[in-house]
Image (cartoon, coloured by chain):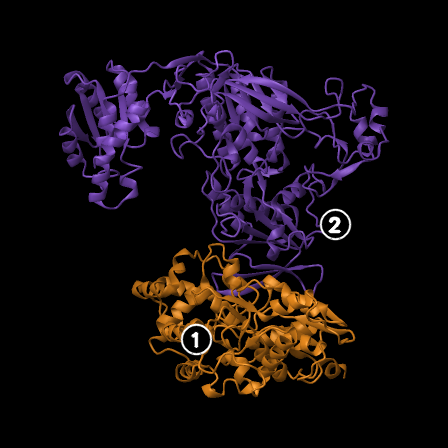
Chain colours: A purple, B orange
Amino acid sequence: MSRIGVFVCHCGLNIAKTVRVSELAQFASTLPDVVVAKDYKFMCSTPGQEMIANDIREHRLDRVIVTACSPLMHEQTFRKVLAASGLNQYLLTIVNIREQVSWVTHDLDEGTAKAKALLNGAVSRSRLLMPLTSRVIDVNPDVMVLGGGIAGIQAALELANTGRKVYLVEKNSTIGGHMAQFDKTFPTLDCSACILTPKMDSVLQHKNIQLMTSCEVSEVKGFVGNFDITIRQKARYVDHNKCNACLACTEKCPGKSVSEWDEGLVKRKAIYIPFPQAVPQKPVIDREACTFFKKGKCRLCEKVCEQKAIDFGEQDTFSTVKVGAVIVATGYDLMDTRDLIQYGYGKYPGVYNALEVERLFNSAGPTSGKVTLRDGSEPKAIAILHCIGSRDKNSHEHCSRVCCMYSLKFAHLFKEKTSADVYQFYIDIRAAGKGYEEFYNRIIEEDVKFIRGKVARVAKSVDEPDRLIVEAEDTITGKFIKLPVDMVVLSPAMIPRSNAKDVARLFNLSTDKQGFFMERHPKLAPLSTMSEGVFIAGVCQSPKDIPDTVAQANGAAAEALTIVVKDKLELEATTVMVNPASCCACQNCVRVCPYGAPFFNEPKGVSEINEALCKGCGLCASVCPSSAIIARHFTNEQVLAEMEGLMEF
Amino acid sequence: MSQTVTPYLEMSQAIMEAGGEALKKCYQCGTCSGTCPWTPITHFNIRKLVRYGQLGLDGIEDFMWGCSTCRFCVERCPRGVELIDIVTAIRNVYSGGGMLPQSLRAFVGSLSARGNPWSGDPAARNDWAKEKYPVYAPGMDYLFWTCCTVCYDPRNMRLAKAAAEILNLAGVSWGMPSPDINCCGESLRKVGDAELFERLRGKNLDYFKSNEVSRIITVSPHCLATFNNDYGADYDVTHFSELMSQWIRDGKLVPKKDFGGLTVTYHDPCYLGRHSKVYDAPRDILKALPGVAFVEMERNSEESMCCGGGGGGLWTEKAKGERLSDLRIEEAMGTGAKVLATACPYCITMFEDSARTLNVDGRIQIRDVTELLLESLEINIDEPVGDACAV
């Protein structure tokens, strides 16, 4: 005989509008072993929790069922109520009548009937629940940050300042990310390098940060508190311990390739540092561009290097780091706009993308900050085209969020650096950040022309072959505009890094429709992921500006800290166990487990479980032909009882 | 006219119910109107049409007939709005209220009374063939679906004959439909007469069924698109250009005549290109003709210009300066082409008219790729193109 209490939550009207909650509580009270059943407006609130605690005492309850929202939301909340009342927390059952009932129907009768069926199943299962003991594990105090853009830099510094050891892993040969390419930042127009490079230097100098450039994660093992991460150090062909950064090698090198840093606008050497303020300020050899690697002779860099740091024989090496938490901050790429043939990118030299223009403004850029076209002349008229490939079902449906603002910034810089007429072709101006609307007003007053209409086509001018014609409807006057310009700037969609899929696979992250990493909850856990102990920050989660990115990085650092600050971590007790007497040694469990928890004990001839790795998903139990694997909290008897209860309806 | 208006959402609702559901998606960015070939030259504005539809505003009738359903805006719309469905729905709702323009009344009347848009005698549908070509019978490889325009329009009869001759040369068994079929109804549907379209469609489907038709060849991309998209039946429908290019590749047809350096450009019919995604086949045919110098116009393939003949445009009068076909002829002549080739009887009609009214018919010839291929096969049903242009 159990003594079960059932607590039905209205969730305001979220549940109550499509489930007759008092009828559900009334129904519960008629079920066997249910000694008390109540409904309440917000069960998760303090009075709701107190009501449950009181009833546990008053009615001497030994099982509690809460019919409310998804267990992802409040299972922990109610487990704490049980624990505080002296009940084992695993004697709680959550019945999800919000996401699985009230939010998926408009019909009161249907909703109420389904809620009753689910509750009936839960009561049947509840009787069979067993008290379980949580496991406690040691926590590694270190953290890994993946990605050395502003998000990764910020998170790494925050964590390192708390005394934690941080591994900052960056795939390029320098940290800094996209922010290091910018000249000015909106809306304050402060110099990007002035605020970023000190931080880059702090990373290099920080005793708690191990900077790992030209590195990629190749394998992730373990789990929250105890990750074992294998890192591939790509061969740089320069021994950075010996190199004294004299850069004589880069001067002599005859090999050339396009500068990624300058968005392909100019060339760089085969042995190079990406830009003068790069961190670390030590060169690497680009194998594809190196004369020696291509032709078997040259070695000029080796000859001029007094430190004997050049090592053509260097190979990729692998090392493993152990950390308790991970922050992923892998950033973004701009979409390739060549496929959008109507805008002529890649076809007409006068058409630029936004990052190229950032480089033109930059005093460390290919034109030393002068705005000139590819032929060296100054543009007399410039059109900035918003929403290229963003907000577009044919490419990317999401709004890239920062383009309106940087387009305004571009307009200002064009006005400052040239005497050109500047036009913005936009659909809506989205200026929703602090000081952004004011910045928009300022740009309007700088006499930038705003044309509300998405550009339909960029064509070569017939009358003036060096110029371009921008065609659009000004939707405010309804007139068709043909505007002769010298320069067209595209504001393309921001999309996840090209290797985001690999990163998602390594860390078991979900991705949204556009490929950005999914947060655990859009509002209440925006930096957490479904992988415990792995956090996300910056544009890898969705397009955002620098202030939001930095705020997220700080938040992710704090989240990671809540894990690594503890010595011990309590893990779910809902793991599986093997009954060795029934194990038939088929090893199905070893093959299906995504976490590598089951292993085969050869001498004993049976499978065993590494409980530290087990997440309790039950996959192994479901494929075990001899039912030797028992999933705690989801035993066959418990699951079947729930099914029977459901099917009574 | 008063500038004060009140949204009339019942009208907007009616448009959505008539198939213009996509009204809801539009955010008025102006991509459609910026892309639309009519915007620069007429007062027609597709974005405004949608806007008036969204709010059910009076005055919509001023520009509801401007669209030639070229599909350029649909391809580019960032919201995935099926603008042609909206245009069709608006016309359906309003033409039901007696707002059909004068020029389209004859068109609809003829389709209703005679089953073709050209006021032709239904019994005379196959007169162009002069009993030289077979009528379809069950068991034949192909039904050669002769568009009403190639049956009744004297200029386009040459296209019908050219296709018939090439079918014979290819050695396939084929037949044309008996005169009791009627127009495919494509343009009629776009003009908004859904009810009459259903009647025409039903009758044609009965014919296909009772004659055990399985494979259909069309020379008109309009028939092609409507059979594939609006008939809701599973027939193997092919545009003739695709078969011809296949037969050339297979060596079944070998172009012989040398055109001696004749410059030819190609205009993509909207219903063959954007509507049916056939871009290569007609070009492959032209490139296979000996001595043809093939040149592209700047606007080609996916970005091709419209001739203005779709969506009822073929039967609507347009003032000088407001004709897309005039602009297209000028663009073609700008490439130095002596022949403007295309693959659609509507385009041919529009261009022939323009070439005449622009008084350039002595300088540029309008030809279907079918006609050019036939000429290269040295079968003559027509005056030779090369010679005419050599002057």
Q: Are callouts 1 and 2 both on one chain? A: no
User: Residue B232, percent across and down?
Assistant: 42, 65
Left-right relation of A43 to A547: left
Q: Which residue is mark 2?
A: A376
Residue at x 32% of width, y 23% of height: A635
**In percent of the image, x 65 and y 44: which residue is there?**
A356
Q: Which quarter shows the C terminus of chain A?
A: top left
Looking at the image, residue A101 lies above or below residue A210: below
What is the x, y in percent for residue A505? 53, 31
> Relative to B56, does residue B337 appear above or below in the rendering?
below
Which-is-in-front pick, marks 1 and 2? 1
Front residue of A442 and B352: B352
Residue type indicated by callout 2: Gly
Q: Secondary structure at mark 1?
A: helix
Residue A579 vertical placement versus B389 (above, below):
above
Q: Residue at x 56, y 59 (%)?
A: A456
Say which chain tag 2 marks: A
Query: Is residue B316 something one can see in this rendering?
Result: no
Instruction: Identify residue for label 1.
Output: B207
Q: Is residue A223 visible?
A: yes
Q: Secondary structure at mark 2?
A: loop
